[in-house]
Amino acid sequence: MNIARVFVCWGALLWVFALHAEVPLAVAIKDARVVTVSGPELPKATVLLRNGLIEDVGPNLTVPADAWVIDGMGLTVYPGFFNALSTWGIPDAAPAAGAPGQRGAVTAAPATPTPRVRGPEDRPQNYSYERAADLVNPTDKRLEGARSLGFTTSATFPNRGVFTGLGAVVNLAGERSGNMVVLQPIGEQIVLRGGGFRSGYPGSLMGLFAYVRQMYLDLDQYQQAKQSYTAHTTGAPRPPYDHDLEGLLEAPRILLPAEQVQQIDRVLAFSKELKQPTVLYGLHEAFNRIDELKQANIPVLINLHWPEKPKESDPTDVPELRELELRAKAPSVPSLLNTAGVKFALYSEGTDQPADIKKQVKKAIDAGLTRADAIRSLTLSPAEIYGVADRLGTVDRGKIANLVVTKGDAFEDKTTVEYVFVDGELFRPTKLAPPGGPGGGGGARPNTTGAHRDEADDFGLSSAPNQTQGANN
Amino acid sequence: MSLVKLMVCVLVVGCTVEADSILIRNATVLTVTKGTIEKGSVLVVDGKISAVGKNISAPAGAIVIDGSDKFLSPGLIDCHSHTAVEGGVNEGSLSDTSMVNILDVIDPMDINIYRALAGGLTVSNVLHGSANAIGGQTIVIKLRWGKPAKDLIFEGAKPGIKFALGENPKRQGYPPDFFSGGQAAERRYPGTRLGVEDEIREDFTQAKIYQAKWKLYKEQTAKGEHPVPPRKDLRLEPLVEVLEGKRYVHAHSYRADEILALIRTADEMGFKIRTFQHVLEGYKVAKEIAAHGAGASTFSDWYGYKYEVVDATPYNAAIMTRKGVIVSLNSDSDELQRHLNWDAAKTIRYGGMTEDQALAMVTINPAKQLGIDDKVGSIEVGKSGDLVLYDKHPLSNYSRVLKVWIDGHEYFDREQDLKDRVQLASQKKALLDKEAAEDAAKRQNGPGGRGPGGKNPATPEKKPDATNPEPPQSESGKQVAR
């Protein structure tokens, strides 16, 4: 890991030197309010970054002579935001123009017809072995938008099939793909999405359950066979190498979807049956299953894409009470889980525009989540869930220099993101476009101005110039 | 229309009255197995019927229901249902999908459970569809509305597996059409009734080999050896259970020839068919069905909806009964299951069944077919307190269900339901008003708000839903289930 980190730093530095000989090795954000997340807020402190890491944090720090200084008066420093489940960083997973916001819509239909599936033995829809770490690419257009909002990190998972592959914690910038990866593999995401009645196996929800169950039974047997062969390599037949099961074998945890209450019940029981460390994702109707989730004692990821009244819906079509309650109460799920003491993090699948994500987080805050808890669920909590809290998620000495510096409280309407640091590299965000409006604040569109590498001469040394002019909409 | 909409929202209030004992007195008690008791009483204690007769006094603290001029029957039982299944009733991809299990996908929030309760139904045999020769594993549920899925499972009821014969499983695929978005479904074996039998024979042959492998493994481990265990195969496990008599076979069938063919295959492979489902030509081969020991679960008067069901008659149930077959009437439908008692009444008109014989077809007979007749299906001491109170005789089509109990708990009360509707309607109105107010506020926000003029092509309109793989059941999907 250390080697990888050194690589990250050197990569960043080499690039920086190539363009700007004067770029500093160290940056000091002076006299800012610092929300450390790990401890109490520091009302006036300096954050010193060096070599892609946080070298020191505290009031009354001596700023080294070689450090470039950013005047932090009136600014707030947060740990960079961490999207707990998305496809950010995998360019192919970006939603195509006009495609519905369905996860995986882009890759749903394979270009070439696959051979007929005879059953679970043929391992249909299995990409368990694909690695997000191999698929991420800093050229993903969505990264600019994500950084504009202050996101510096994502738990990124490939998104096709039922066993979608091995996720990675990635930083949302980097000279090369390899520089982005913080930790991998962090888990196997399972998507319970069948092909429907006329598709190949598995087509139905029960088919998906049977398939996943069979895979883990096969995994048990595979492990047994491997162990017994390792003990007696001479004179024993060797078990075949199984690519599909190796993927499952590597995953330290599985991610299972559960949206409605009956799905939550079902998946909690299924998780026990599979005996895999589990993280649930979705959870919009969890307001009716708080006690059960508390009892289950497993972490959950809450989808920020709150259910809303469909746009241009038929005005005569009156939704069911359950649907209305879902729309009204879903944003209160983070607050309810927080009060109950359930470990949770927030995520945006990667199909929403940054300005929309900002509103979605605000909605959870309006529904009762304190700002501090909202920040925690977007920083330290996901880092803890994925086992990277030793290097990400707080503003503390020795952590990766992922920071977001705002003017105003994060996720408030009037708040602007002034600086974003990813692995110590500075990005200057531009104003977010109005939610969903033309120009959408980065997002998937190539021609918008989102957060960009700071190549300008004014490095914000003495003041924090208003960067909002960058957006031309 | 508004009534239907309101029913949709009767979600939350499946109120249950908790009490140790309930006495229903002065009602016409239709025990089904022990005749009819005029002005009779039934006492339920701790969920079980503890006394049935003329003069029963209420224990202290018992809830007493006056049944004057009312009728009490056992809870109705449906031997063929697809209610409360989430994410598709058919795993239609393969010709043998015995690895899938309805148990995994029971949806206790399905409003049709409540509506069936309101029609006096208390037990359902929830089946996989009939798209394939050997379909999925099935379970029996009690309609305990409001409880989580695990609490709906009928304790001690033997699980089943769905077989299907004839047109549905021998469909080799579908041409591209509207429902498939222009994509043809994959073609598969079999394409004939001969092939369906062959598929079943082949699958059981594999199951026997699998059974033998495990037997050998167990023998070896018993001897102290350490062999590598065979691969656990979720497809073959339930078929071994069928061979060992631990799982019932419910076989969707219509024509006499295919019924006989399956009996021969079962005899050859050494397993039993527990019920023939639909079995519209059962009247032609009733003796053979009875000799095999199978039950018949049929429709009262539903036929002619496809070619293999043209040679049918509403006398089917009565004829099979007279030939010694245990016959039940099933719904196979979210709608029909709400008035199975009226369907039973049709066998009096078509075939001259007695009232008890008719009622038995939706109570004790399906209970026998499902192997739960020691627990439910009639009003007898020791059985579950699954009871239905009607305002008129349940075989009259003017009858209405007033109250339904399962295990002595009240799960439906007509008066309460009518009250709840008012409350739920106001709850709903409050939420709708709130949304409307929020919409209005957004429109006033001006630029940046999501006013009606703000075109927003790139923003996803539907919420991503990874857990719900199927669109709502299409017409064609439903047909396959019959």
Image (cartoon, coloured by chain):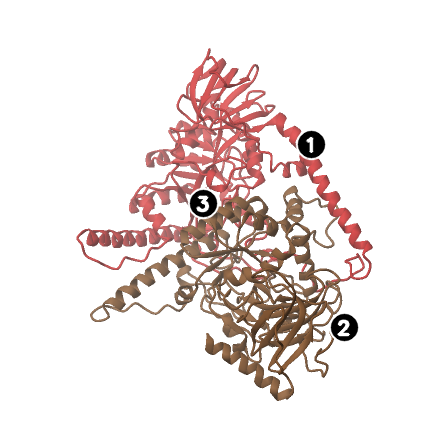
Chain colours: A brown, B red
Residue ID for mark 2: A466
Residue ID for mark 1: B422
Three-letter amino acid code at the position of disc 3: Leu
| Foreground of the two, B475 or A101 | A101
In the figure, residue B69 lies in which quadrant? top right
| Foreground of the two, B204 or B127 | B127
Residue ID for mark 3: B103
In the figure, residue A276 lies in which quadrant? bottom left
Residue under the point 17% across and 52% down: B223
User: Can residue A205 be seen?
Assistant: yes
Give neighbour class at mark 2: few <14, some 14-19, many 20+ (Cα, 10 Å): few
Q: How far apart are marks 3 and 1 (CA)?
A: 35 Å
Q: How far apart are marks 2 and 1 (CA)?
A: 56 Å
Callouts 3 and 1 on one subunit: yes
Give neighbour class at mark 3: few <14, some 14-19, many 20+ (Cα, 10 Å): many
Expressed as whole percent of the image width and height from the top left, the position of residue B89 reads 50, 48
Please name which of the two marks, 3 or 1, marks the residue nearer to the observer.
Answer: 1
Q: In which quarter of the image is the N terminus of chain B?
A: top right
Residue under the point 46% across and 76% down: A2
Three-letter amino acid code at the position of disc 2: Asn
Give neighbour class at mark 1: few <14, some 14-19, many 20+ (Cα, 10 Å): few
Expressed as whole percent of the image width and height from the top left, the position of residue B234 reads 37, 53
